[in-house]
């Protein structure tokens, strides 16, 4: 047991960014999982007597414009954050990896199609694109997940493709073919494991992105709406109250959002460094 | 695994093979031009050339990593181009290759043990335990300590890794081994050990070898026959001692004279060649060596000279100015 | 890191007084500190007391394999060590200790008094500047020539190094030149300011065999014409045998044997030298495979002879590092670092 833990402790010591990033993500994940048990109140119960009340002993982070407890809403909001980010990124990976694998290894029309679609996506700011599609197809969580997942898939494809192209310039693939590997085995045993490090880093980055996009969509009024305790929707309501001085309604969800995104990006950064180092220093 | 080849039919036959690469626009890079090469079972043939000679391309065509643009490559009588993918894949256990860069050729994420087990996994029906035993036996023959089997390629030295590659290549007891500059990236004191190992293995297993190198001394030590390449063409071939003692082609002569012996008392008379090797994209129209040849004449531009052989038929060279009493212009094929 | 003992230092001064040597390297130790995967600090001992002389007008071959420290010796001489390098010792050139030079003083020496030919010509040449302009820049940095005069000199030297049509090639970019041509340009840059010492670090790696001979012939010819001294760093004993007057063999950061090429090849005194020579000649060695042949572990701290764990002569006495000894009084420049040489 000790032997399994020690290498990880060393990794954390050399790469504190991974440790911190993962810690933040883990805390939020715990929040999301354990929400019913750790939230002090029900997130959509209206406390008519305490609408827009500032942070106090009763409501640690105050209440919003509907009289709902901010703290509980933030805790449950983590569920929505992960609930959107995880399936969306999963979808991206499931679509993007095989496409990138094929485009990089075989080239041909799939490669061309991939490159053109990447170019197309680059033309539009992705948030505007997401906005348009969700607005057109209906504001549901499923649609938000689908749109984000599809828009991000080419990124995974591209990252894997780039690494495979680099591999093809070297001897590994030739050598594996010479020893008698068929195409399937070659792809899964030799090509994929050696071209996936970029994609692994991207997982964390794209999750941060998915959370941001869904919050933005909610903020703009597309996507998830009140009374669902989604951070973006909460910030939308809170924005109106900033001018009248009820700062907590927007600030706390905003902080929650920023911290989680920061944690995810930090972890991604650290993982990238770690994988780069590990490859040369085994 | 022995094949039923009659003495006359070679194990490997590259028949008038040409290979060109498309380099954009209408240009083509002709890497190999009309090369014919035969290797008999158990024979060690050396392929000598500098950059642009096409030797690496020939090595890859020999084991079907690259198809020829023209001509055919036959292994044990069968045309490689006509084989089904699966049959070709299974044929690979009879022909293997060792590359110049051992780090590049091995999957950095696999342990040495797993790497050496791979050919057995792909081509035999041995159980896991039997494979493990076989890997241990191979490691011992390659003089690799058993603890190394648990390590990763990045943790081994160049010499050790090359032994791993050789062990892997010989695991399925192939009939043909192609070696593409196997010791060029290794230290001098390590080279001798590797070459000794190859020599021993050759004598013990009777495997045929195609040894690609730019180092003439290594070729002389290991090979039975040698083929000299220049800009994708065969310019001379024959038994190794004959070619080295009496080089017929001016390029071979220049190459031999450019060698630097590790002995200050031996001074070779250097033939000074003008200029450098032309780019394969701009190959001369006639004899490829015409731009630098000390005995160039106008008629050397009129097309590729035919191979001329000596009376024994073994030593041949492509030059218009060979002494006609020694080399006749009979039998154009090698 | 101990200093060499006074006896050894005196021995190395006997035959070659510092005045006649173009370059005198004395007792140079070089280490790099880094962290291992576990996070502990460890030191790579790259040079462990290097003693080397380059006689005036002589061509010295510095030979060694991976990890020997030969490139690092060159880097230390021309002051191109990274800031994390820990270096002690002396490198005397024209009466000055190069290890103590910094800034402008060092710049005056480099490029003018000491010329450097790098291993990879493409790495040495600036990719976005024309070749002729790079030469001119170098000429004007160390002389008062006007631009047209410098240009003329550049064209002359391009011709001298055998580049056809130098007027036209002056305007070429490095990537337009072949490997051999690029290396000739690097040689031109090293020699254009008539240095007293030329250091060439593996000048023919990556070049074809026929081109290699041409480049080495050129280097030797120019060095002799300018009456300069040269230090050629290589792993190829053939180059040393055919082009050098003197040689020094390095292993694990020490010079284990040195002397004139004729002497060392005729009677190699150190086991490593003998092994290198045998390996370079007879391609197939017989008992060589069983001897440990990985590069030396530079992190290991040891008082023993650096070659002890792979030497066929190793004995108990080899647990103490040997001192440099003269091989025979007839040739006092032939020195070796081994216990088993009897002082005649």
Image (cartoon, rainbow, N blue to C red):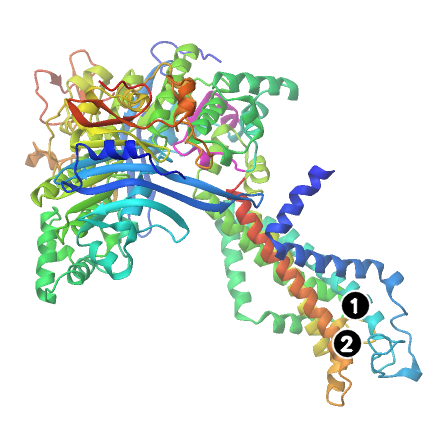
Report the residue at 90% width, 76% height from top.
Answer: A58
A113 shown above or below B186: below
A198 shown above or below C22: below
Regarding residue B118, the answer to whether it shows in the image is: no
Query: How many numbered badges does the structure rendering display?
Result: 2
Report the residue at 31% width, 20% height from top.
Answer: B45
C14 shown above or below A222: above
Q: Which residue is mark 2?
A: A234
Residue A78 picture location, percent across and down: 77, 65
Residue A122 picture location, percent across and down: 53, 67
Q: Specify start and end residues of the magenta stretch as a single range.
A: B87-108
Residue A20 picture quarter: bottom right
Quadrant of the frame with the N terminus of chain C: top left
Residue C115 picture location, percent across and down: 20, 49
**B166, C7: nearer the viewer:** C7
Residue B203 picture quarter: top left
Q: In this view, which residue lies farthest toward the bottom?
A: A244
Q: Which residue is mark 1?
A: A77
Callout 2 environment at 10 Å: few (<14), some (14 to 19), or many (20+)? many
Q: In this view, which residue lies farthest toward the front?
A: C6
> Answer yes or no: do the residues labelled 2 and 1 have beta carbons within 8 Å?
yes
């Amino acid at each position: 047991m000790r032997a399994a833990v020690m290498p990880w402790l060393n990794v954390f010591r050399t790469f504190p960014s991974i440790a911190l990033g993962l810690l933040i993500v883990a805390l939020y994940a715990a929040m999301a999982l354990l929400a019913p048990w750790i939230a002090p109140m029900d997130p959509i119960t209206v406390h008519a007597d305490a609408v827009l009340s500032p942070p106090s002993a009763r409501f640690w982070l105050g209440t919003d414009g509907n009289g709902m407890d901010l703290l509980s809403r933030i805790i449950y909001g983590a569920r929505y954050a992960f609930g959107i980010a995880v399936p969306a990124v999963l979808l991206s990976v499931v679509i993007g990896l095989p496409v990138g694998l094929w485009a990089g290894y075989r080239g041909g029309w799939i490669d061309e199609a991939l490159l053109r679609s990447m170019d197309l996506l680059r033309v539009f700011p992705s948030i505007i694109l997401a906005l348009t599609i969700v607005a057109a197809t209906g504001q549901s969580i499923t649609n938000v997940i689908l749109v984000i997942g599809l828009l991000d898939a080419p990124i995974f494809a591209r990252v894997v493709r780039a690494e495979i192209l680099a591999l093809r310039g070297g001897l590994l693939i030739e050598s594996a073919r010479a020893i008698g590997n068929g195409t399937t085995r070659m792809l899964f045993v030799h090509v994929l494991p050696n071209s996936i490090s970029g994609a692994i880093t991207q997982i964390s980055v794209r999750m941060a992105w998915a959370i941001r996009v869904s919050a933005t969509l909610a903020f703009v009024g597309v996507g998830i709406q009140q009374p669902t305790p989604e951070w973006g929707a909460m910030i939308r309501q809170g924005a109106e109250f900033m001018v009248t001085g009820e700062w907590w309604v927007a600030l706390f969800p905003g902080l929650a959002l920023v911290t989680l995104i920061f944690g995810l990006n930090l972890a991604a950064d650290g993982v990238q460094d770690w994988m780069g180092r590990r490859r040369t220093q085994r | 695994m022995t094949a039923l080849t009659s003495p006359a039919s070679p194990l490997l036959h590259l028949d008038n093979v040409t290979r060109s690469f498309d380099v954009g626009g209408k240009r083509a890079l002709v890497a190999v031009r009309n090369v014919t090469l035969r290797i008999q079972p158990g024979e060690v043939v050396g392929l000598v050339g500098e950059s642009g000679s096409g030797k690496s391309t020939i090595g890859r065509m020999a084991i079907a990593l690259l198809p020829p643009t023209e001509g055919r490559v036959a292994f044990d009588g069968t045309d490689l181009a006509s084989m089904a993918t699966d049959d070709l894949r299974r044929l690979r256990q009879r022909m293997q290759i060792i590359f110049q860069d051992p780090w590049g050729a091995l999957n950095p994420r696999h342990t040495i043990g797993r790497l050496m087990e791979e050919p057995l996994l792909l081509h035999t029906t041995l159980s896991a335990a039997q494979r493990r035993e076989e890997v241990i036996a191979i490691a011992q023959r390659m003089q690799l300590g058993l603890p190394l089997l648990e390590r990763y390629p990045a943790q081994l030295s160049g010499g050790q890794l090359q032994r791993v590659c050789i062990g892997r290549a010989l695991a399925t007891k192939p009939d043909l081994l192609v070696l593409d500059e196997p010791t060029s990236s290794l230290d001098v004191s390590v080279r001798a050990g590797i070459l000794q190992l190859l020599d021993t293995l050759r004598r013990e297993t009777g495997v045929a070898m195609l040894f690609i190198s730019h180092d003439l001394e290594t070729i002389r030590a290991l090979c039975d026959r040698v083929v000299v390449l220049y800009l994708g063409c065969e310019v001379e071939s024959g038994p190794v001692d004959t070619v080295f003692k009496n080089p017929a082609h001016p390029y071979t002569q220049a190459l031999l004279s450019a060698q630097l012996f590790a002995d200050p008392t031996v001074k070779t008379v250097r033939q000074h060649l003008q200029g450098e090797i032309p780019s394969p994209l701009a190959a001369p129209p006639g004899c490829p060596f015409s731009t630098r040849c000390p005995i160039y004449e106008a008629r050397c531009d009129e097309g590729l000279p035919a191979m001329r052989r000596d009376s024994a038929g073994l030593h041949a060279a492509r030059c218009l100015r060979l002494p006609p009493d020694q080399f006749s212009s009979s039998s154009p094929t090698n | 890191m101990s200093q060499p003992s006074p006896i050894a230092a005196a021995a190395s001064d006997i035959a070659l007084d510092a005045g006649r040597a173009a370059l005198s390297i004395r007792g140079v130790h070089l280490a790099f500190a880094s962290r291992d995967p576990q996070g502990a600090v460890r030191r790579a001992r790259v040079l462990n007391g290097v003693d080397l002389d380059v006689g005036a007008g002589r061509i010295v071959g510095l030979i060694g394999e991976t990890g020997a420290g030969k490139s690092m010796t060159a880097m230390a001489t021309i002051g191109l060590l990274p800031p994390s390098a820990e270096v002690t010792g002396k490198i005397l050139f024209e009466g000055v200790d190069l290890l103590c030079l910094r800034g402008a003083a060092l710049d005056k020496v480099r490029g003018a008094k000491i010329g450097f030919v790098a291993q990879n010509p493409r790495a040495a040449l600036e990719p976005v500047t024309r070749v002729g302009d790079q030469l001119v820049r170098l000429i004007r940095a160390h002389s008062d020539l006007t631009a047209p005069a410098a240009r003329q000199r550049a064209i002359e030297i391009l011709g001298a190094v055998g580049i056809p049509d130098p007027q036209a090639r002056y305007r070429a970019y490095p990537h337009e030149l072949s490997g051999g041509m690029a290396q000739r340009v690097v040689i031109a840059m090293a020699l254009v300011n008539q240095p007293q010492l030329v250091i060439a670090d593996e000048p023919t790696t990556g070049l074809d065999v026929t081109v290699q001979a041409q480049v080495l012939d050129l280097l030797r010819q120019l060095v002799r014409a300018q009456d300069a001294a040269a230090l050629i760093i290589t792993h190829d004993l053939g180059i040393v045998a055919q082009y050098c007057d003197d040689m020094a063999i390095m292993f694990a950061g020490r010079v284990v044997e040195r002397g004139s090429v004729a002497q060392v090849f005729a009677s190699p005194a150190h086991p490593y030298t003998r092994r290198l020579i045998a390996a370079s000649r007879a391609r197939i060695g017989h008992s060589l495979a069983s001897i440990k042949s990985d590069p030396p572990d530079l992190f290991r701290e040891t008082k023993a002879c650096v070659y002890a764990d792979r030497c066929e002569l190793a004995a108990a006495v080899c647990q103490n590092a040997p001192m440099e000894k003269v091989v025979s009084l007839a040739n006092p420049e032939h020195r070796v670092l081994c216990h088993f040489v009897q002082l005649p």
